[in-house]
Structures are given as C-alpha cells and as structure tokens.
Image (tube, helix red, strand yellow):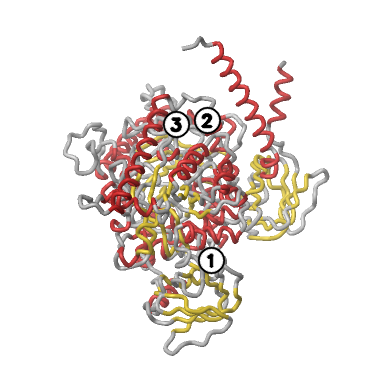
Amino acid sequence: MKLLGLLMASTMAAFAAGEAVLIQNADIYPMTGAPLKGGSLLIQDGKIVDIGAKIAAPKGATVLDGKGLRVYPGWIDSGTQLGLEEIESIRETNDTGELGDFMPQLKALSAVNPDSEHFGVVRVNGITSAIALPEGGGGGGRGGSGQIIAGQAALLHTDGWTWEEMEINRSAAMVLNFPSAGGRGGRGGGMPSDLQDMFPNANAGADARRAVLDQIAKLNAFFDDARKYKVAKAANLPDFRKDLKFEAMLPVLDGKMPLAVNASRAPVIHDAIAWAEKQNVKIVIMQPREVAKAGPELKAKNVPVILGRVLTLPENEDSEYDEGYTQPEEAYKAGVKFALGTFTNEFVRDLPYQAATAVAYGLPHDEAMKALTINAAQIWGAGDLIGSLEKGKLADLMIVDGDPMDVRTQIRHIFIKGKEITLSNKQIRLYERYMSRQ
Amino acid sequence: MKKILLGTLLALAPLGADTIVIQNATVMTEGPKGIFKGSVVVRDGKIADIGEKVMVPAGATIIEAGGQYLIPGIIDCHSHIAGSGSINEGSVSVSSMVNIKDIINPDDIAIYRALAGGVTTANILHGSANSIGGQTLPLKMRWGKSAQELIFAGATPGIKFALGENPKRSGNPQGGRGATGAIQLGRYPATRMGVEDVIREAFNDAKAYKADWDAYDAKVAKGEHPIPPRTDLKLQALREVLEGKRYVHVHCYRADEILMMIRAADDNGFKVRTFQHVLEGYKVAKEIAEHGAGASTFSDWWAYKIEAIDAIPFNAALMAKKGIVVSLNSDDAELMRHLNTEAGKAMKYGGMSETEALAMVTINPAKQLGIDKTVGSIEVGKDADLVLYDGFPLSDFAKVQKVWIDGTQYFDRDKEIAAQAAKDAEKQQLLDKEKSAQRSQAARRPNQ
C-alpha cells in the first residue's frame, strides 16, 4: 500500500513532454558503454540531451533525485500483437491475421488500438516499445496461418494518443512465413530435423513436399513480378499503373526493409537464408527453435534472429529439459545477433524475467540486457533512436531500484519520448478499489 | 534371469534414501524456524534435524551447499500432467464417478520436467468440461516409479468442480456467441444459471442417497438386517463430500460464480476446500475467507478469454491480505517448471515478503490439500522433500540444482549435464541403425 501511495504521488508529479527533466545522482547504465555511477541525465524536448558526472539544471527544469536508483533504457519486445489483439480467444478482438497469400500492403500500425488495456499493463513493467506483428504467433482464432507474406510489422512506442503518435517505424519489417512442410515456417508440428531425412514421408508426404515447392515457386514469382514493377515504374511509361502490393515491396527489394521470416527448424532456416541470398534481400529470422544447429550459418551470413519465449517446453520428449532456457546462450555462443520476443500479449510484461532465466542458464547478464534494448533497436533499424542512453536519442528510459531483470525490483519512473508515464493501469485501479472494500 | 533383471532395475533407480547432511545452505523452512544458514539432516526419508549446527551422523553423505538455497519441495495445487490421454469426461455434466487414479501415466516426461523445476508434489485434476468433474488426488513426482508408487499416501482425495465458460461451452450453439443455429451438442448446461442448477440438483440427489445409507447404517448398528440401498458410484463421491471425506476443488473465474458456489455449498452443508484459478477472487475475498476456502490462482495470466479480462497480478497478495490461504498453481506443464518465480511475482505485485511468497508454492498448497502434516515446510519429522537452488529461489536468476523426495535424490543438474553427451551418442546410434535399416529395405525394393 505504501508503494502504491508512492506510485500515486509520482502520477501527480508526471512531467509533460517538452519540459526539461534532470535526473541526478543515479547510476546510469547506457548499454552502449560502461555504467556511470552517480551521474546525471538531462531530458529535453523528448530526447536525451546530456549525460555526465554532473550537469547543471537548466532554468525551469524539474530535478529528480536518483540516489540509490539506476537508470536503464526501456525494454523492447521484438515480437508482440500489442494493440492488435485484446482477448486471445475472441475473434472480434483480433486483427492480426488477414486473408490472402501475398499481402505486403497491409500495415499493422493503422490497426493498433492505442487504448488497448495491454499497453497500460506492459508499460508499467518498463516495456517502452515493441514490434507489433500482422500475424499471430500461435493458433487460436487469429487466422492468417495460410499467408506467405502477411504484411508490415510496426515498431511502436507503448504510449501515445493515437497510433500515429506511437509510431517509431510503421514499416519496420515485412512478415514472411517461409514455406515449409511443418507449416508457418516450420513452427509447431512437423518433425525434428534430425528425423526428417529418416522418415521423408512420415508427416511431410510427397504431396506436402510438392506443396512447399509450389509455394516457394509462387513466392519467387511474386518477387519477380515486384522487380518487373520496379523496372516499369522507373521507366515512367505513360500507361504505368500504380499497384499497392508491389509498391509495398519496393523497400524490401531495395534492402531498406528487412523481411521478418518465420522459420523454426534448421533446414527451413537454411532454405530461408539461401533464398534471401538469391533474392538479395535482408532478413531477420523469427522464433528459430534450432538455433545451435543453424548458428554457424546465421553468423556467417550475418543474419540476426528474434528468439521466442525462453520459458517454453522442450519440443520433443527426448529434448533436454532446459532446451528453451539455453537457446539465448546458444545464440550468443554462436556469435549470432539476437533479441527476444514474447509473441503473446499476455507475456510481454514478463520479458525481463524471461531474459533472466536465460542468464540463469548461461547467457551473460550484459548480453541479456542488450537483447532487450540496443540489439533489438539495431535489428529493427532504430539503433539511432532507441535502445540505449545516449545523447540525441529518444528519452525512453526507466528509473528502478535494483537489477531490472529481478522480479523484486520496483520501477519508480518511466519516460517515453521524454514524457513521464503514469504508473497506473486498469489492473492497479482494480487492486486499489478492491483493497478498499470492507 | 529374475535376479539379473532386478539388478538392472536397481542400477536405473534413483539413489536410495540414505542419511544425508545438506550443509551451509540458506534454508528457507516455511516453518517455525524461518530462514537460517545451516544444515538439514535427512534420515530414512524424513527430516531428522535442522539447525545452524547439527550432529553429523556417521556415514552420512555430505552435500556442501555454501551459497545455495534450500527450500521445501514445491507443491502444485492444480496440474494435469501424468494422465493417459484425455482428462475431460465431457459427455455428462456430472462425472463424479471417474477417477484420475485409474489413468496415471508414470512415464509422462512432464513429471521429470516438473521435478527439474523443483516440484515434488502435484494435485492432479480432470479438465473443466463438467460442472462436477472427476475424482482427484495428489501425486509425488517420483520419476521412474510405477503409477501406484506415485500416489501420495494418506492424502484426502478430492473432486473437481468447474464453473463459467468451460462447463457451459458444451451446451453452446455451434458457431459460438451470436450464432442462430440450433444447439448441436445439447449437453446441459449452456449458461451459468444451468451450472448452478446442475450442482444443486446433484447435491439434492446426493443428500437423499446419503439419507438412505445413513438409515441403512443405523439399522445395521441396531443389529437389524435391512436390504442395502443400491450403490451409485456417481453419488457415492458426492456423499463423501457431504461427509467431509473428499475435498472440493472448484475451477472458477468470475466473482459472481464464486459467490454462487459458496452459497450452493452453504445451502447443501459442505465446504469448498479450494477455489482454483479464481481470477476474480479479489472481488469476493471477504466471502471466500468467511466460507473458509483456500484460493489457488495464477500469478499474472490474463486476457486469454473474456472471463479472464479482470484478472490482476495482485490477486494472490490481495486475497492473502484478506485472510485467505493462497497458493499459486500452474495448470500447465510449462508453467509448472517455474512456480518458484511465479511466487516471486507476489513480492512484486502486492508486496508479499519472501516467506509469504514462497509459502504460496509450498506450505499453503500443502494446507489446501490437507497434507501439511507431512510436507510443505522444512521441519523435523516431515518428509524430506527438498529443493536446492544456486541462488535466491524466487528470482529468475536461480536454477534448481538438486531435488529430493522422501530423502531420495530424483534430480541432479550436474549429473543431467554430465549424461548429455552419452545420451546424444545413444540417440545418434539408434538413428544410424534405423537409417541403415531403411536403406537396406529400400535397396531390396524393386525399381518403380
């Protein structure tokens, strides 16, 4: 209750964007350099304008004493349905899975509901930005499982009056479900790769294999058409007609927008990398399950990955019991650049605890922190905007009283784009209301 | 031949229960001794001594646990592992005649994984398709033992009830909410009103059944030789509920249905032992406390269905503050592997102390299952169900190192890791063998 009082007090003291805020005497963990003990950080006009041992407070600036506290950049969840899905089991509240095989023109951002209760819930746990995906991470009523290109994933802030205000990049990545016999990039179902060549017809019969080849042929044809469109557009002929699908593909063809490729098994990852090389496009592998096996190739080809939940069951009965826990360490050891995603709105607020489990099972602490901050920002092309505490970056940060991945640590202040966030949400309001019931 | 076989079995079985001293650990007892740095002595499967300083029995195996944490074995009050196949007898609204005991599968790998997550006891329940489901019982996670040997001896059996969306789903029109089609499956009930009625009708019958048997027993006691009433396996289980010999564990979400269940139990003269999931328990904490029921909930699950929309992560702490014995359960083979960190969330959300939080996965579920005389805390005389962590056990930074049940070690991370290479090699060998068999088979096949 005491803590809640504190929270409420900080609510009233919330600062508006544009105002200058000086944080003093705090331990500052920038992620891109060594920590600065007892330092200062100045926020102005939504940005970090200075970091140093001692900064004089500008006129009119609000001063926050950070004694005994630590400052970190906000967390980035690299795979969510935030704003697109409210209640998992109710189709009417889901806007993640559209129809159609090739739908690059779809944008997750404009379907994001800024008033989704999920934003309030994840914000107070320090998640200041996230990737919102135009396709579901699981089954359920989401639909979209048959899609090959599902649309554009958005990188967004978890706060804002409208989706426009929340936007960091509406076209952060193009989601591609790489055709595979396991379905949806080989995620779920399917046979482990070490058994696949043994039982070539067990669950991927000749028909299924033909279907995969057919889908890849379609995918290649779509890219060929997009390239022809690009040539036609450049030629600027009088009868040229704009096509929204192909128009959306141009940044992908130009290497400006990566493809976020769902590929789980090592052979599918291999196929996806080889395909991307041939197509000369940038890719990020989403939710790989056989990262140790695919590691050398991922590293050699400089392909980053977004690992799924650390707290996940081993896939096969004879898998190591800690298979999910050790995935991040395996990615790290292989030298693969990686970030983490929770891929289910319900688990977004647990992102730091998922990372902590990876630390328990061998991932260096610093690397876990980077996976949730600067690595994620860089993978999504926002390394100059968010993900670390550096001069000129957006002031997305949290002030906490301990290790931010430790469940015992409490968050004292959160800033998104320099604006202090009210540390409240529907759940906290319900708690206060029912605590007062006599 | 028999002798050789026995020898092999013994070699595969976990290390026997001998005398062990776990020393220099931080011991979180969840008992009267609180938290201390020192030793725990295990003998004959029981905790023989605890303290800052203990007498080390001659010949005891010493486990040096400096810098590590020892806690009581974790108890999961709600799990569906170790069952063979389906656990939902959804064909009828009242299925109190079916029993988990009949379908225990000791080979379910989820048992080992739970063990590796520090769970030593789990309450195994049926699914939630029926208003009144089947008979339940707690198991110990004695991996490698037979189905019979997993059963928690002497524990009061239970029965699963279910309220809300799940039991009414079978009666919904096909196509879900808003569909205009006829009710296809047609199994009553289709609403929360019907769920209440099913429960009240069942107890109406059970009370009459009990009266018949009571009358019969009275006559027998007087030396008469009456004709016994017909045994009804469905009502027999409910009669045991009325007699307090079987605990009622109620799957529920919303405050209205929780209150309904309390009143239905009050009116029929029985107690709800635990409300399970009970995501809106915080709204009717007063009524749950007055009824004397326990609450077993999730730490922070929400929004996966409409009846979970008002779930709050403060639920466990709030209910505890309002005087309810609260536990955190898994209901899920994955979550089951880290109930310790689920307990940790009760510190974050609602400010429970570390002892209060850890109680939610140890002594509190033991109380709820009526097994707190033998498990749930580290006290002399209790079963030596113990978990050793390499760090503060409510934090995600800690991992399980060793697990003992009844003084027998069932999990050891070091041994697990040491055995990995051999396991992989064996698997490769089997794969190669199968592959070559396939190849030679293919070679024998005529050209197509």
Q: Position of residue A91 (x, y in %)?
A: 28, 46
Residue B285 in picture, x, y percent from top left? 38, 58
Q: Residues within 10 Å of mark 3 (few under 14, many from 20)?
A: many
Label number found at residue B105: 2
The residue where tag 3 is placed is B99
Taking the view exactly as shown, the residue that stands out farthest to the left is: B180
Front residue of this view, candidates A271 and A42: A271
Which residue is painted at 48% across and 69% down in the image?
A: A411
Residue B296 visible in image: no
Look at the picture and state if B420 lies above or below A256.
Answer: above
Q: Are marks 2 and 3 on the same chain?
A: yes
**Does A306 sit above or below residue B19?**
below
| Amino acid type at mark 1 | Thr
User: Mark 2 packing: few (<14 Cα in 10 Å), some, or many (20+)?
Assistant: some
**What chain does badge 2 belong to?**
B
Q: Is residue B195 shown to the viewer in this render? A: yes
